[in-house]
Image: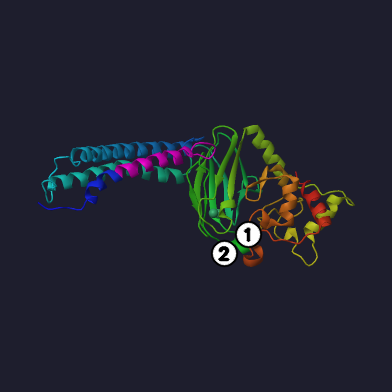
Amino acid sequence: MREHPKSRHHTGLVTPIRRAVLAVFGVAVLSGCAGEQSALAPAGPFAQAPHDLILIVMGIAAAVLVFVQALIIYSVVKFRTRKDDDGSLPKQVHGNTRLEILWTIIPAVILAVIAAPTVQLVFQTMDEPDDEFMTVQVIGHRWWFEYYYPDYDIYTANELAIPAGTPVRLEMRSGDPGHAQDRAVIHSFWVPRLAGKQDMLPNHTTYLNIQADEPGRFIGQCAEYCGLSHVNMRARVEALSAQDFDAWVAKQQTAAVVPTAGTLQAQGRDLFHNLGDRQACATCHQVWEGDSQRRPAVGPDLTHLMSRKEFIGAIENLDEPTLRQWLKDPDSIKPMQYETNGIGMPNLNLTEGELDALVAYLLTLG
Ligand code: CUA
């Protein structure tokens, strides 16, 4: 009779306890999946499909979990140390061909069952939608999303307006050739309630279909680490009724109104285009006044800035105090370190007077 280390008797119990703790912790974490940014609350067909797949996979995984846990509990109870235990080992076996074949085939079958709908869905995600759809180009910048509507020649940022009930095909890429951003990085566009997640790559177009069945506001987030302010790169989708969307398009297609000469707003417009030896706002931002071509800019298009509810990568409400603070000290709101890496919004050392005029001007851009 051999003595074996005492710890052997404990390992069988520690694992289930640790797993129980993990399970409780997991439930707590998963409860965070509910709410307005949840893939478990799909709001359109392109989110419904991955949601259904998640449930299938979770169902199978749960069945496997229960089966394995049951076997563990059974073994722990049946082979626990008893008072009259003489310390001898159970009957030792080496190898069991039939069992080994079985537990190779069963997981292979399970994986095949999961793989079929998964692969099908991956391709379906990228296919052109069957119904009539709208195209929007999405460009990931550090650290904000730019949207261009080729059918309407509209540029906007941060908030993606779409008509509810219509499939929208996003043509996505990262960076903007010709600007500082062509040192592009990988971003990922993810609005969990509307679609799965898709990477945005430099020099390569990827596609993602989204649709919101009902009007509403849907929150997203850049889902691929893209540097300093990755966490401050949010996406918003505004799903509008057909009527509201038409009104939105009509508004976005109009040129910005030039303020009356001699006003504070007009002074702000002058500063927007000329800040002396400092870089003018217009170097990077466009306010389209109907004369020139609309064009992609280095920074967000500001023609109808005030028609948006949020700005700064959709992390802040667009109101006067925040706008002022943003112009005064951008890094206090969103770290970018423009002075070091040339990306993002620079601190232009604006005087209080310049801030008054610029903010007054920007507030006219409705
Ligand atoms: Cu863009 Cu993370």
As drawn, the residue found furthest toward the front would be 83
Do we see residue 217 in this rendering? yes
Residue occupying the point 33% across, 40% down? 61
Q: Nearer the viewer, residue 72 or 120?
A: 72
Q: Main secondary structure of the magenta part?
A: helix
Q: Nearer the viewer, residue 119 or 326?
A: 326
> Residue 193 at what x, y percent from top left?
51, 39
Q: Which residue carries the number 1 mark? A: 336
Q: Which residue carries the number 2 mark? A: 183
In terms of image quadrants, where is residue 133? top right
Residue occupying the point 54% across, 51% down? 172
Is residue 149 shown left or right of residue 319? left
* Mark 2, secondary structure of its residue: loop
Q: Name which of mark 2 and mark 1 comes first in the sequence.
A: 2
In terms of image quadrants, where is residue 13? top left
* Mark 1, secondary structure of its residue: loop
> Residue 46 at what x, y percent from top left?
48, 39
User: Which callout, 2 or 1, points to the residue nearer the camera?
Assistant: 1
Residue 22 part of the magenta segment: yes
